[in-house]
């Protein structure tokens, strides 16, 4: 499965040449709320395979 960053206007994806790190969203409800608020996309709800790059 290809990892694609979910951040607005970010086209980073994981491949063998990347030095970026990709992070899954936390399961803790309080921390998840902080992460989703930081995405700043109205109605954003991450799925189980949604990732955010380190950039």
Image (cartoon, rainbow, N blue to C red):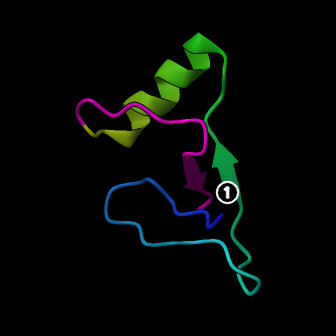
Q: Quadrant of the C terminus?
A: bottom right
* Relative horizontal placement of residue 33, taking residue 9 as reference (left or right): right
Quadrant of the rendered image containing residue 38: top left
Which is the main secondary structure of the residues drawn in magenta? loop
Q: Which residue is pictured at 61% across the width and 35% down the height?
A: 25
Residue 20 sits in which quadrant? bottom right
Q: Is residue 11 above or below residue 18?
A: above
At 22% from the left and 33% from the top, the residue drawn is: 42
13 lies above or below 45: below
Report the side of 13 relative to 15 (left or right): left
* Left or right relative to 23: residue 55: left
Residue 35 position, x and y percent, is: 51, 32
Q: Residue at x 47, y 35 (%)?
A: 46
The residue at 58%/12% (across/down) is 29
In the picture shown, does residue 53 fall above or below 31?
A: below
Q: Quadrant of the N terminus?
A: bottom right
Q: Which residues are magenta?
A: 42-55
Residue extending farthest to the left is 42
- Residue 22 in the magenta stretch? The answer is no
Dot 1, how many residues are within 10 Å of its Cα: few (below 14), some (14-19), or many (20+)? some
Residue to which mark 1 is pinned: 22
Task: Determine the secondary structure under disc 1.
Answer: strand
Residue placed farthest to the front in the image?
Answer: 1
User: x%, y% of residue 5?
Assistant: 51, 59
């Amino acid at each position: 499965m290809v990892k694609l960053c979910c951040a607005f206007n970010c086209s980073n994806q994981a491949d063998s040449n990347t030095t970026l790190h990709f992070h899954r969203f936390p399961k803790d409800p309080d921390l998840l709320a902080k992460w989703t608020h930081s995405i700043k996309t109205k109605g954003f709800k991450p799925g189980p395979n949604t990732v955010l790059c380190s950039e």
